Amino acid sequence: MLRLFWNRLVWAIPVLLVIVVLNFVLVRLAPGDPITSIIGEYPTPEGYAEQLRAQMGLDRPIHEQLLIYLGHVFQGDLGYSFANRQPVLSLILGKALNTLALMVPGLIFASLLGILIGRVSLSTSARFLDSTLTGLSLFGYSVPIFWLGQVLIILFAVELQWLPAQGMFALQTDLPPFLDYLAHWAMPGFAVTIFYAAIVARVARASLKEAVTGDYIVTALAKGTSQRRLFWRHVLPNGLVPIVSVIGYNFGLALTGAILVESVFAWPGLGALFMASIIARDYPTLQGIFLLAGAAVVVSNFVTDVVYEIIDPRMRNGSRGA
Amino acid sequence: MSAADSMLRIRDLSVVYEIDGRELFAVKNAFIDLKMGEGVGIVGESGSGKSTFARAMMALLPATNARVASGVMEIDGVSYDMVDKSGMARLRGRTFAMVFQDPLSYLNPLMTIRSQIVEAIRLNDPSANVDHRVRELLDLVRLPQRCLTAYPHELSGGMRQRVLIAIALGCRPKVLIADEPTTALDVTTQAEILALIKDIKREIGMSLVLISHDLGVVSSLCERVFVMYGGYTIETGAREKILSTPAHPYTQALIHTARAVRGEDGRFVTLSGDVPRLVEAGKGCPFAPRCGVAMPQCDTVLPSLAHVNDNGRHSARCHMHS
Amino acid sequence: MAAVARNRAISRLAGSPTTWFSAAFILALILMATVGPYLFGDVDPNTISMSIMAPPSAEFPFGTDELGRDVLQYIVHGAQVSLYVGFSAAFAATILGGLIGAVSGYVGGRIDTLIMRVTEIFQSMPTFVLAALIVALLGPGNNRVILVIALLSWPQTARLMRGEVLRVKRLDFVTAARCLGQSETVILIKEVVPNCLAPVIALGTLTVAQAILLEASLSFFGLTNPDTISWGRILTSGQRYIFQAWWLSLFPGMAIFLTVFSFNVLGDSLRQALDPKS
């Protein structure tokens, strides 16, 4: 168990390292002086540029600069955002919570919906429903999510005026906060759910269809298992590993998966901050978001691996398949 | 064929496969009967329809392209229409339980041995004393207690087959159906499992339907034999009669090849030609193309089942006897 | 045998009306992007008219934008960029991924393990963030966008190719070629790779869809060259004027959706038709 833990840690380190190094390299690849890139066009205190230059060790050889940068990242010092007048770390962590408020319910609904679509595809009596749902998931898989958001706004905010078009909470409202959040969540949440449900459904259909052909299903039937029990106890667990893998992967990317939706709906999360930072060329913030996104991937990979082992005893003894 | 003391009678069973729009028979007018505590064997080469026969009893035919075209079953005085799939499916477990060929693939890889056995017990008797029954079953199949917490991939082939048998017996079925229970095992383990099934049959008076291509296996476990060829039951009788005075040319050839791999002239004896995979209705004797003593009528007229001797208990479907 | 298999593949492909629609749509799109300007007269889509943000009418079927430009003309010309970027990026990703996967699977051993680790790391990257970051830092330009998309899309192809090579290299005809004394490189290129291509091509079609979507997303955020006409860029105006001009969002987005949808359907159908297992 401990060995496995180490294996995973060893796997996680290079991913994080690559992201940190990429962060380092990208800023230096940008045309012009890194300091100008980092500070941008924002008013800074007198002598800040020189202070930063010394702090980053820009007068030292490149490998030392990298080590200095690594040291800063390791201490949780991700720099200061002049565009937002805040340290990057606290800035992005605050925004990340809003993003999770958008994405987590969406991903959970999408996972359930995706599995449900997979369940329907197993039924021999629901061919029509299955092909309809398959068509719908192909739609969700192909639709540009920012366009889906725009169409939703045009339909439900502009034409019907049922739902608020922008933001997470209204400035002034009679609604209790939770309902207010729900009203604002409805459209972006729907777009997120459709998009991810399509991805999960694609995988769920294939893996459940494979699981249901297993010989152990015949044994279960021979015992006298009911159809409902058969699905929950035998088919779903055996088809679950690829489904968990795709869900885990998308949870890992959730922080940045929201970028497109957030900017369409002006949801005050990490994605919107990312876009604003791109327009403002706020490099410390962009680097911080990229780092956080990478860390999220690593953490979700870890959790996914643990879930694999809970599901499948055969994975408990070996290491992850390379 | 008056068998008033039969607990199970199946008559006129036909199973149709639909392939490329054509309906082909895998089983045609086949039958068996079985007394309480008796073992009967269904013997034939692969493609003879013997496994399809067993699957039809369990209502486990592939849902997409196979169906029971006709068949009447009588068990303990109650009769069932075998065409009614859901009616037959309700008999799984408490009436029929099945042991399969490949013990690894037929066990759910994600469940412990205990929970797979417990499932069989609970589904068929919700009020059972589970712990007591599990211990009883383990003793019956000669497995140590420590196997209960194991997963299928942690056991040997022979142990897995014992688990499959324990699962089947856990249902407390009236009839145990064993489909090639030893074929996938190595020779020593085969002998162990055969001895085990024999003991169980004696100890608890289990009624057994054994499906096998191996006359040796069948004759060691069964009192009576049904030989199948091309979907038809072509000969039936007591084990001794079938072995000593086989009536059908196919059975004769089968026994000849099984008993003496080398013929009188020292050469290997094999049956020439292929088993007809699926038969179209209304042709002559299915064995005619490979039969050494075929007559002109054999190609055109299907022989009817006729008594050979043994007070009407030995019958064959061959023109030589009609 | 091969001919029979191919005929079956074609007849299976022909089965679905959705597949036909998708193929026809892609064909029409390619024609529109290549010979369209010659057939219908090469109108400069940047032509500014007096009708500013006019709703769809007989003169402007898809309406006009905030500068009075014809949205239909914009969509027609935008197809060029979308297809160019989509095809080039998918082509580059397929070549790159195919090459890496083939070498990894064929050579095996430690090199294989190492390459697969690197592939895994690439797959763990938040694709869109990295693409946006790179384009934002290095500046826009179609070729740069293509390069970034290709660099982020190859791992999937590499994994597939590796799996196929692992399967094919164990087959008898490869051993036969080795017995004839052919060099390993020749065997890989002449015997193994051609037998792995079918699923890779199917995946390549899906990669075109992903690349078009990624390009549209980048240009939606204004990260691509502002001088090139692209579908995603009109949606930026659509976002700005969402309360006034629904046509600025609806039509260009529909064009992106139908294109991506068609490539996805075609890729799926190809995969199913070429899969010897199904």
Image (cartoon, grey):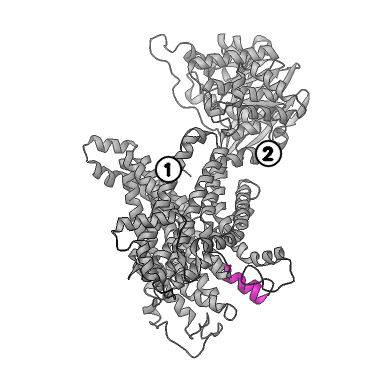
Q: Which quadrant of the view contains residue B71?
A: top right
Nearest to viewer (mark 2 / mark 1): 1
Relative side of C93 to A291, left or right: left
* Residue A146 horizontal/vertical position (percent): 54, 68
Q: Which chain does the numbered disc 2 sit on?
A: A
Disc 2: which residue: A229
* Residue B318 horizontal/vertical position (percent): 58, 20
- Give whichever of discs 2 and 1 has the lower sequence position: 1
Mark 1: few, some, or many residues within 10 Å (few <14, many ≥20)? few
Which of these two is toward me, B211 or B289? B211
Q: Which quadrant of the view contains residue A75?
A: bottom left
Is residue C133 highlighted in magenta?
Answer: no
Q: Say if mark 2 contacts mark 1, CB within 8 Å.
A: no
Q: Is residue B142 visible?
A: yes
Which numbered dot is residue C13?
none
**Which quadrant: the C terminus of chain A?**
top left
Residue at 35% from the left image edge and 48% from the top image edge: C101
Dot 1 amino acid type:
Val
Instruction: Give, as a single range, the part of the protein colored magenta.
Output: A149-173
Dot 2 amino acid type:
Arg
Q: Which quadrant of the view contains residue B43?
A: top right
Q: Which chain does the numbered disc 1 sit on?
A: A
Please give the count of numbered marks on the rendered protein. Answer: 2
- Marks 2 and 1 sit apart, C-alpha to C-alpha, by 40 Å
Is residue A151 highlighted in magenta?
Answer: yes
Q: Is residue C165 above or below residue A149?
A: above
Disc 1: which residue: A10
For the residue labelled by badge 2, is the local secondary structure a helix, a strand or a loop?
A: helix
Q: Is residue B23 visible?
A: no
